[in-house]
Amino acid sequence: MKVLVIGAAGMVGRKLVAALLAAEQVGGKPVAQLTLADVVAPVPPAAAIPITALAVDLSAPQVAEQLVADRPDLIFHLAAIVSGEAEVDFEKGYRINLDGTRHLLEAIRLAGQGGPYRPRLVFTSSIAVFGEPLPEIIGDTHHHTPLTSYGTQKAICELLLSDYSRRGFVDGVGIRLPTIVVRPGKPNKAASGFFSGILREPLSGQPAVLPVADSVRHWFASPRAAVGFLLHAAAMDTALLGDQRNLSMPGLAATVGEEIAALERVAGPQATALIQRVPDETIVNIVAGWPKAFEANRAKSLGFRGDASFDDIIRIHIEDELGGRVGS
């Protein structure tokens, strides 16, 4: 099996590649070749199989055609700019998040004109496709009402994925990821970045800024769960999806206060004492229209599994990123 990972230099992309190489197969099919693509060249890990790493911009002309020229059997499309950046830079958001995806789908369709070709395409969407008015718990049939450019771009891509799948050009699965915590590394430009920051920095003995109230409620999953979603989407029987190709992933609903309480249970009061409450009206207003919780019954019935507790999410970060130790 030939596997292509677009967005392989990102946090989830790197963890996905490591999981693919550890498993050596997807759905019982051995991984024989791996291509990693991102705007910054991914660092290829040591492996027994051939790995190609490419620094490319999916939204640029002919890049998508280049990436599918050797007809990968499985494509993970993780590439996107995040919510805050897409809102600030309107043109860049649509170019990267929408045009890049459209180029990829078209390249796959055109590649199929030279002979049968229908790869599995796993696309990472977002719960940002939903916006006010929202119920307290969002069901699987709730309609899209995005209130950000990022959410709108993802919603359009979901429709394209479903249509290209319906027409038989691609075998697509779109997974709407919860907000991923705890994200390792430096903060990014996502408006949701503080959800990770108030855990990540204190766990490393550093101060963190909380820009919203403790009562803010949101939907979360760990990086480990996100990789599990991607691998399950790659191997599942897509006949079970019918024409509804996009799924909200299982997660955990928690308030910021509950998030902080979990941090104190796992790492102690010395960690939570490092959180500084500095309200930011811009972030407050953005977060106010975000989803708070999902049923995700359809995804669960299809075998997708989330995290058991928020304490577990924090412990996963400690195990995977801090070597099992808390503090500087």
Image (cartoon, rainbow, N blue to C red):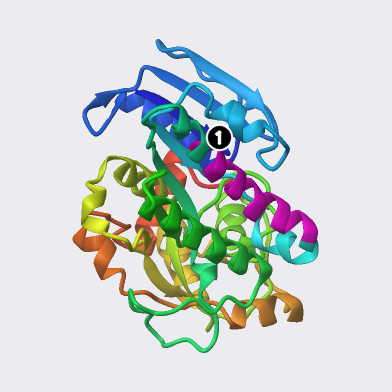
- Quadrant hosting residue 170: top left
Query: Where does residue 15 sit, x and y in percent of width and height?
Result: 47, 36
**Residue 285 sits above or below residue 54 on the image:** below
**Residue 292 sits above or below residue 150 on the image:** below
Which quadrant holds the C terminus?
top right
Report the span colored magenta: 91-108
- Is residue 99 covered in magenta? yes
- Which residue is pictured at 77% across the width and 54% down the height? 92
Secondary structure predominantly adopted by residues drawn in magenta: helix
Query: Where does residue 231 sit, x and y in percent of width and height?
Result: 34, 41
- Which residue is pictured at 59% across the width and 45% down the height? 79
- Which residue is pictured at 45% across the width and 58% down the height? 177
- Is residue 127 covered in magenta? no
* Residue type of the residue flagged with mark 1: Ala
Q: Which of these two is toward me, 314 or 96? A: 96
Residue annotated with mark 1: 8
Asked if residue 139 shows in the view, the reply is yes
